[in-house]
Amino acid sequence: MSKNTKESFVFYRSFYESIALLPEEDQFPIYKAICDLALNDNTSNLDGTSLAIFKLIEPQILANNRKYKNACKGGRPKKPKQNLNKTKAKPKQNQGGTKTKPNENDNVNDNVNDHVNDHVNVKVNEVDKDTQPVDVSDTPQQVVSELWRRYLDLSTGRPFRIKPKVGSLVYDPKTEEQKEYEGE
């Protein structure tokens, strides 16, 4: 065998598990194509599912081949050795110690808060349209449109609720029964 002939390659379990899912008559061509690429740098003609599985395996084989070729060249260049005869630089004279100076800053905080509250207070009993319940007797499209409009108008900052139509059936969690809604 010549010095540059590759004698082995890494075959991963994931290769085996992927190929094992194929019918036996489709497995051999993939094994042969993997060996041919890994050992001889030759590509094979595959088609269909065999080609699809091989295309998933091929990048790993090519990466491993590239690593092998770089290792044959000697790998990474060695770092230059440090000259052991060269003396290290002596520390500078000013490293003996530092003198501390007292802090002479007089920090005076002259900040004045000139903020004026421009917000208008709203009375709790004051009612606007967005706090009113949505009438579910409308068509579903109207209910969704109204809920969506309220959702997008978040400037009110108040939640909304859905109010059933008087006389419609509602679930009462206290009695766990359905009953007619009588209003508030």
Image (cartoon, grey):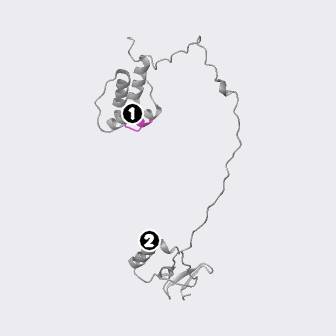
Q: Quadrant of the C terminus?
A: bottom right
Of 62 and 96, nearer the camera is 96
Amino acid type, residue under disc 1 in the picture: Ile
Quarter of the figure with residue 30: top left
Mark 1 crowd level (few <14, some 14–19, many ≥20, 10 Å Cα): some
Q: Which residues are magenta?
A: 17-23
Q: Quadrant of the N terminus?
A: top left
- The residue tagged with tag 2: helix, strand or loop? helix
Q: Is residue 154 magenta?
A: no
Q: Which residue is mark 1?
A: 57
Q: Which residue is mark 2?
A: 152
* Residue depicted at 42% across the width and 26% down the height: 64
Of 109 and 15, nearer the camera is 109
Mark 2 crowd level (few <14, some 14–19, many ≥20, 10 Å Cα): few
102 relative position to 88: left or right: right
* Foreground: disc 1 or disc 2: 2
